[in-house]
Amino acid sequence: MKPAVPILDHSPEYQPSIRRILTKIGWAEQYASAAEQNMRNLSQDQENYGVYVAAAGEIAAGFLYVQYYAWNQLCQIHGLAVDPDFQRQGIAAALVRRAEEFARSKKARGIYVDTPTSNTGGRKFYEAIGYQPGYIMPRYYEDRLDGVTYQKFFEK
């Protein structure tokens, strides 16, 4: 499915709407602040990071950032979020495809993402787009919140 909005490189004008998305979807303050700071800082390092926004006119409908690790030739998706008003329009899948394009441009072997084990919607989404569960990380997010890693390796 083609998304309803274009996927663009991050620019500072989208910061207020990124905060709005994080607030709407209920991210805890420590995660929302970290995501905002990461997007500002990481968009300056285009060699190792891709920072993308689904742009709905003047606002962000979603965002994602991805990091390349040279030591193991893998990329990691960070901070994928879509505004609830724009969900189920193919935006998350388009953002992940853009992250995969970034990974392939780096000649990465694959890509992975972590999400809370309680994020059933996110887990179903990753499985639907071809990601396989890798492992559970006890207490990854908080003392009572485990994480699960999903991974996708590219064919040579």
Image (tube, grey):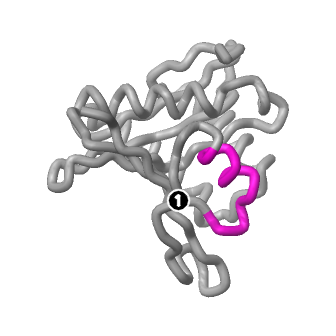
Q: Position of residue 73 (x, y in %)?
A: 21, 47
Quadrant in which residue 104 is drawn: top left
Q: Position of residue 152 (x, y in %)?
A: 42, 45
Residue 32 inside the magenta-drawn segment: no
Image height check: is 57 above or below 41? above
Viewer-closest of 110 and 65: 110
Q: Position of residue 101 (x, y in %)?
A: 37, 26
Q: How many marks?
A: 1
Viewer-closest of 147 and 9: 147
Image height check: is 57 above or below 80? above
Residue 117 inside the magenta-drawn segment: yes
- At 71% from the left edge and 14% from the top edge, which residue is drawn? 4
Amino acid type of the residue that numbered disc 1 sits on in the rendered structure: Pro
Left or right: residue 69 versus residue 150 is left
Residue reaching furthest front? 155
Q: Residues within 10 Å of mark 1 (few under 14, many from 20)?
A: some
Q: Which residue is mark 1?
A: 133
Residue reaching furthest right? 85
- At 68% from the left edge and 23% from the top edge, which residue is drawn? 59
Q: Position of residue 119 (x, y in %)?
A: 71, 60
Image height check: is 97 above or below 116? above
Left or right: residue 108 versus residue 67 is left
- At 48% from the left edge and 69% from the top edge, which residue is drawn? 135
Quick one: SS at disc 1?
strand
Residue reaching furthest bottom? 143
Q: Which residues are magenta?
A: 116-127
User: Principal SS element in the magenta part?
Assistant: helix
Quadrant where the N terminus is found in the figure: top right
Quadrant where the C terminus is found in the figure: top left
Question: Is residue 95 among what the camera can see?
Answer: yes
